[in-house]
């Protein structure tokens, strides 16, 4: 059975995932304002992914017979110096998410809450992928530097990104 501390921590993480969606939607808004529709699409899809993460925890809390509790959220950053700045912000945000997931996992481990440890494994793997994705895009953007053709090609590539909910839960 989930104890109150772990239930509260899961609720906190669920709320942070919803906040992550907010952070990425704000970046999408910045990109759209710069007429970079592909980058805007990339971050809109990222926001969808974050909502999916939040709902996965929402469902888990319910499945374990506990109550979901939504909270308010901070105002995300809406202005950036450049696309690179926005991606660096996103990368830092993901590193913070990873820290929080690890903390949650430590709590589950201390509690010998094996079901929650198993549940969190999906998030641990997901964080490896998300950090790697942002790191790789940052490296590309740095290499592209002033090459506007390469930059617009990346924008066109990101226009193709779409959200497909993972089938394996
Ligand atoms: Fe849900 Fe991007 O971490």
Image (tube, rainbow, N blue to C red):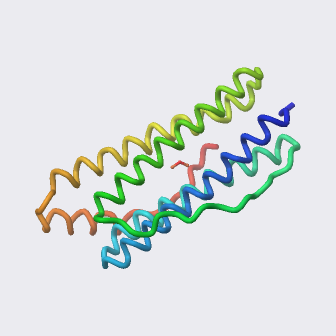
Q: Residue at x 54, y 43 (%)?
A: 97
Residue 119 is situated, as x and y percent measured from the top left of the image, at: 68, 35
Q: On the image, which quarter does residue 87 sit in?
A: bottom left
Q: Does 88 appear above or below 106?
A: below
Task: Say which residue appears at 84% left-offset and 40% top-offset.
Answer: 64
| Image location of residue 80, percent across then percent down | 35, 65
**Above or below 63: residue 70:** below
Residue 99 falls left or right of residue 109: left
Q: Residue 143 in the image: x percent, y percent? A: 15, 51
Name the foreground residue: 101 vs 159: 101
Q: Quadrant of the C terminus?
A: top right
Residue appearing at x 45%, y 69% in the figure: 78
Residue at image point 87% right, 31% down: 1
Vertical position of residue 109 compared to residue 46: above or below = above
The percent position of residue 3, horizontal first and vertical second, equals 85, 32
Q: Is residue 80 left or right of residue 130?
A: left
């Amino acid at each position: 059975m989930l104890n109150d501390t772990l239930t509260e921590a899961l609720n906190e993480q669920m709320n942070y995932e919803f906040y992550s969606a907010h952070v990425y939607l704000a970046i999408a808004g910045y990109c759209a304002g710069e007429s970079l529709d592909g980058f805007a699409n990339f971050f809109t899809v990222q926001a969808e992914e974050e909502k999916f993460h939040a709902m996965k925890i929402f469902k888990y809390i319910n499945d374990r017979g506990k109550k979901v509790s939504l909270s308010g959220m901070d105002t995300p950053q809406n202005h950036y110096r450049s696309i690179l700045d926005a991606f660096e912000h996103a990368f830092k945000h993901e590193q913070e998410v990873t820290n929080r997931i690890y903390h949650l996992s430590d709590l589950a481990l201390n509690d010998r809450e094996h079901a929650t440890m198993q549940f969190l494994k999906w998030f641990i793997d997901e964080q490896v992928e998300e950090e790697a994705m942002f790191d790789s895009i940052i490296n590309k953007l740095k290499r592209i530097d002033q090459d506007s053709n390469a930059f617009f090609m990346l924008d066109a590539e990101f226009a193709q990104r779409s959200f497909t909910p993972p089938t394996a839960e």
